[in-house]
Amino acid sequence: MAAHLKKRVYEEFTKVVQQQQEEIATKKLRLTKPSKSAALHIDLCKATSPADALQYLLQFARKPVEAESVEGVVRILLEHYYKENDPSVRLKIASLLGLLSKTAGFSPDCIMDDAINILQNEKSHQVLAQLLDTLLAIGTKLPENQAIQMRLVDVACKHLTDTSHGVRNKCLQLLGNLGSLEKSVRKDAEGLAARDVQKIIGDYFSDQDPRVRTAAIKAMLQLHERGLKLHQTIYNQACKLLSDDYEQVRSAAVQLIWVVSQLYPERSVFSHLLSTCYVLVQEAHTPGLWTSPGPWLVRNQATQQEGSMEQVSSHFLEQTLDKKLMSDLRRKRTAHERAKELYSSGEFSSGRKWGDDAPKEEVDTGAVNLIESGACGAFVHGLEDEMYEVRIAAVEALCMLAQSSPSFAEKCLDFLVDMFNDEIEEVRLQSIHTMRKISNNITLREDQLDTVLAVLEDSSRDIREALHELLCCTNVSTKEGIHLALVELLKNLTKYPTDRDSIWKCLKFLGSRHPTLVLPLVPELLSTHPFFDTAEPDMDDPAYIAVLVLIFNAAKTCPTMPALFSDHTFRHYAYLRDSLSHLVPALRLPGRKLVSSAVSPSIISQEDPSQQFLQQSLERVYSLQHLDPQGAQELLEFTIRDLQRLGELQSELAGVADFSATYLRCQLLLIKALQEKLWNVAAPLYLKQSDLASAAAKQIMEETYKMEFMYSGVENKQVVIIHHMRLQAKALQLIVTARTTRGLDPLFGMCEKFLQEVDFFQRYFIADLPHLQDSFVDKLLDLMPRLMTSKPAEVVKILQTMLRQSAFLHLPLPEQIHKASATIIEPAGESDNPLRFTSGLVVALDVDATLEHVQDPQNTVKVQVCRVLYPDGQAQMIHPKPADFRNPGPGRHRLITQVYLSHTAWTEACQVEVRLLLAYNSSARIPKCPWMEGGEVSPQVETNIEGTIPFSKPVKVYIMPKPARR
Amino acid sequence: MPEIRVTPLGAGQDVGRSCILVSIAGKNVMLDCGMHMGFNDDRRFPDFSYITQSGRLTDFLDCVIISHFHLDHCGALPYFSEMVGYDGPIYMTHPTQAICPILLEDYRKIAVDKKGEANFFTSQMIKDCMKKVVAVHLHQTVQVDDELEIKAYYAGHVLGAAMFQIKVGSESVVYTGDYNMTPDRHLGAAWIDKCRPNLLITESTYATTIRDSKRCRERDFLKKVHETVERGGKVLIPVFALGRAQELCILLETFWERMNLKVPIYFSTGLTEKANHYYKLFIPWTNQKIRKTFVQRNMFEFKHIKAFDRAFADNPGPMVVFATPGMLHAGQSLQIFRKWAGNEKNMVIMPGYCVQGTVGHKILSGQRKLEMEGRQVLEVKMQVEYMSFSAHADAKGIMQLVGQAEPESVLLVHGEAKKMEFLKQKIEQELRVSCSMPANGETVTLPTSPSIPVGISLGLLKREMAQGLVPEAKKPRLLHGALIMKDSNFRLVSSEQALKELGLAEHQLRFTCRVHLHDTRKEQEMALRVYSHLKSVLKDHCVQHLPDGSVTVESILIQAAAPSEDPSTKVLLVSWTYQDEELGSFLTSLLKKGLPQAPS
């Protein structure tokens, strides 16, 4: 009890103190606001000790200073600087000067003289370094002023002899940033002695302090970045630095060598490659080194025009993978070589016994070089490094090189395949991706394929899927290879049934790529027998479907294959063609000429006519204006129907067709709503019948949101039209409300809001207004002044007439448009097995979905879970983590996440509906309009969600709670 | 002439009983204290009588350093410290300190209980010996005494293996012990900074081998195991308790995890369990992957690997068993082997070298019918595989380490003479570093030229700095001062201070020279003429005409005097101090040429 009391007392006490502090703080703010410089001056004069002064300065530094008062502040600071004895205070003042000179709108040339002045009298090294930093800030602020830059360079040169490394560092930095670029200009400038900045910096490559050496190299790189051409001599200097004792120096030197060798490609390409590789071997522990020379090697390869040079370099590249093995002074073949030999001789490894890999030929002791050029095995070293970052970097470097050189790709294949067995998953994944990228250049040997396929059993889903992707685009050389791949994939399928779709897709490509290799396998795969009928396989077996997918895809380009099919295979084909049409292509089957001739040519030849048809039907709609309402409605209905059918038939045109159909539907709804009888009836009677009109308005709104956010590739032209349609819907809504509600009060607000919207519209789309001739908005804007002043009732009347009179706007079709879509793969619906969980606890529901044509899914896609059968009908929205999205291909995304469900009072088994939603926010879209181009969308705008559009079919999951254990 | 002397008592052109004596700058250090596996007699231990015939070793050795816990590096330690007698410090790393006594005890048990040897060290001796051990951390500089310091570097190889740098003043020796330059599944690669020792003593087990990527070997191993298990066969992997066993366990454990396999893996109990316990403790000594994932899960807490029970061997279905000993010569591994050998579905994988005469060696060399004790013949139908997982650096790795450390010379130990010869040649050719390979008992002497640090007084340095411009690395500069040697430290001070410190008065050394000039004028005029002449010639020196008629150039005094005998010749007295020798002699030669004729 006592303790409790004590605690309370303590709490109250602290509270009081805090309040006081706050008050003081607020007061102070108000005091200092009017004049920064004056306040600072008073503060500094008040300061009795250096510590006090430092405190004031620190406080001062926290607040920003306006551009106009900077100069005054600087003067006061300088004045105090002269008086100050304590170096720490001077240091702070110097740093403040640097900060202040960076203030936008302030030209720091006026304080430069002072800064240089105080620099000359300064003794403390730290303050000196800080002052030089300040000068650097000033110098970079005034890039045009040659004279000032010259002066600063002069000052820097003078202080280069300082004993402190910090000061020398800053001087070199200053030189690197401000050293003049053109010699001619420099000579004219005030007759100052021409300084060769490069030489000065180069002299400090041999400074005794490694930090200064690093700074010198960095300064040199800075010079290069600013466009100064570095001398050739620097190359040799930098090469010497490669054997420096300090790592930072060495890694900076590598960068410098890279830069210089870029400048002088003709100069000893060979020798610098050599030196880098040497560094790579020696310094394999720094990942940074791998990433920088990677592109370097590649570019050198590309820049070499002459054949001889190319030969040298490709030979050299291959050396980086070379590693001669020996055992007991006898040459030994690597595992790779052995595997290759076995493959080429057509034999398989017989009895594996000790000494199978026994070394054979004697090695001439004189001829063996253990470190020789150093390039040997540079990559081998990198790939075997202890740090996985280095290994990843090495794989990336390999990838870049292999993409540029097919022969190198062939060579590095073995090493990449080896990396599939790395202990770290990221490395494995990276090497699989790399392999996929270079797969155009390579054909897998059987033994390599074997190793690759072994990874299919990996428990990580990412790895398996990456591997499926890889198999989609690999070339296999033999029919045994195909068979092996199929067997392994089927094994994978039984082990991880969730991979079903991915495996089917993989087999689809495998089949279509290697029809001739699949052909001899068909009887075996279908287990047909020349004399006997075999049992019909189970059609629900995913493995059997997988085999069929492989065969049917191969059969597409191999007309002799269907002859090998048995009767039931044809039946299964028909079934699969219907149920899995994306995996099974249309085949020209002997017994079904009709079907095949109807389907297959249509795909090739009808492309143009369908485009035409689309155009024609849209053009037909443009004559809408001149038709009577009844005719217009009919026309629209027909056109919408046509477009929808077209979209179904032609997948390439589906986006366009859907998009325009949706627009036309909006127009149709609008027309229908305006045709309602209710407009002619007296006000009190509308009440019941206004349903249709208001529903139409609501639906138009929804459709317009869909049009705006669910299609990728929508351009500004379309956005205007969409917004215009929405505006019309809003007008309709206003009219309907005006008719149905009594009393004016709510109407006032609505009118106001509507007019505001019109205003917004005008502002946002001002550039597009000329295209909107004769439209609703056009007319509306004409009458705007009148509308502003009139009463709501009048406004409504005007709107009504205008809606009727307004012209139908043509929707220009965008070039590329795709509708966003999503399919939930997991959970599959219609499962009778309920997901059991203990009520009150959490159950995890795995969700796996593919998204197509969704921009920025991380921010927009949400998962909604609603319990449909449960009386409370609760809906729950879940935001998947950004990490749950994978990007397997352009325009495609994959969402793999877990949804947690929990409910306390849940007793009966019931169904839960899961669907994907697309969140949108119209204000996020607006800034993309032309007059705000370049303006970045701030993250705050994006986070608020205006609404959501469901864009996948809902899936029902059966969930059964178990009673909680007591 | 200072020198470093190295004498291998063991491991000189040989593998086993590593023991190397190093004397550096008057300090004697013993590196490793191992036993030889191949012998059971006196040759088993190093010959410590080489150090001293009588008396305790403590007086002759400053310290003993043990690189790692393998018996060929530490097996003779209790014998050396307790039976021969040594009380000085023994340095080793923490894991070595923890695991070493277990292995020694095990070794003792086999030697005494099984082979019945007498006059062997006892358990108590092992305990007493371990009490003398001082454990060191990686990269920690330990001062053995005022001058001798040692520092440990990571060496890979086995848990706790270290390389040691022994340093006295500016002379240093690096001893590698056994090391591995390529990381494996549980340990990282050896690393050393550019410490530029005078001598690098390196092992050279694989001096003539360049090895293939370890990934190929691992993959082959895993594939073989996996295939056999999938066929429903049993896999037997005979291992020694420490080192490779842990690596293979991690390899299989991660593979099982990755591939989602359910087949049981067993590890025969005993020594290994104790050792695994230490592997769990010393996580900082393992490689990056284990260190990183350790927070979620300690890799040495195996999920799939369980302790083996004798009864499990008869269980049906596939399984993988690790069993000791590694060469299949006795114990559990042999028992299991006999049970499984008859089935061709099964497999035995030998992960290391087998000594001739053991069952392991027989089956590796292809023998299919084995004669067991009791005249029965065992037919081996199971598959026999050999898979080498060695944790020593290969020739390339050794060269790499030499390149990293940049020593002045290299000394090879722990390898066969023929192989060493090759590596020696390579090191001399390619790295241009002198290399030696002494046999046991042979002494290698290396002359050194240690640099002697001299302190300079700040005042003197600043004075010199003020005089000259920037010091340039390429140009030597002259500096005047006095070198004081006092209590074995050196100081360079200005001469004034030296005099003050030594309590001596300053003496001046002056040279005086007479120059005869033929001149009839008076002395005063003469002096004036000399003054004006010198003034015109020596423009950048301070020339003064003093009121007493003498002329000074800087500190050189010139006086004109008339000798009595010949009035027409005048004598100029030129006097200068020792320091102004140069200017003084220049002046005399100038004056000897005579004065220019004055315009009359």
Image (cartoon, rainbow, N blue to C red):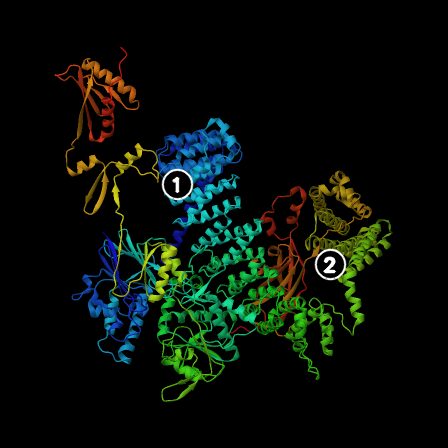
Residue B228 in view: yes
Depth check: give the residue in front, A227 or B443. B443
The chain letter for the residue carrying disc 2 is: A
- Amino acid beneath label 1: Gly
Give me the chain letter of mark 1.
Answer: A
Find the residue positioned furthest to the left: B564
The answer to which quarter of the image holds residue A114 is top left
Mark 1 is surrounded, within 10 Å at the Cα level, by few (under 14), some (14 to 19) or many (20 or more) other residues, namely some
Q: Nearer the viewer, residue B430 or A481?
A: B430
- Where B368 falls versus B82 (above or below)? below
- Say whether marks 2 and 1 touch (CB < 8 Å): no
Residue beneath label 2, please? Answer: A652
Which numbered circle lies on residue A166?
Answer: 1
Q: Position of residue A902 (x, y in %)?
A: 56, 66
* Residue B403 visible, this angle: no
Viewed as shown, does residue A234 lie left or right of A603?
left
Give the amino acid type for the residue marked by disc 2 in the picture: Glu
Nearer to the camera, A240 or B500: A240
- Residue B312 is labelled as none
Q: Quadrant where the N terminus of chain A lies?
A: bottom left
Which residue is drawn at the image coordinates 37% and 34% (left, top)?
A47
On screen, A300 above or below B466?
below
Tell me: residue A328, above or below residue B232.
above
- Provide the secondary structure element on which disc 1 rests: helix
User: Is residue A405 rendered to the left or right of residue A378?
Assistant: right
User: Mark 2 or mark 1, which has the lower sequence index?
Assistant: 1
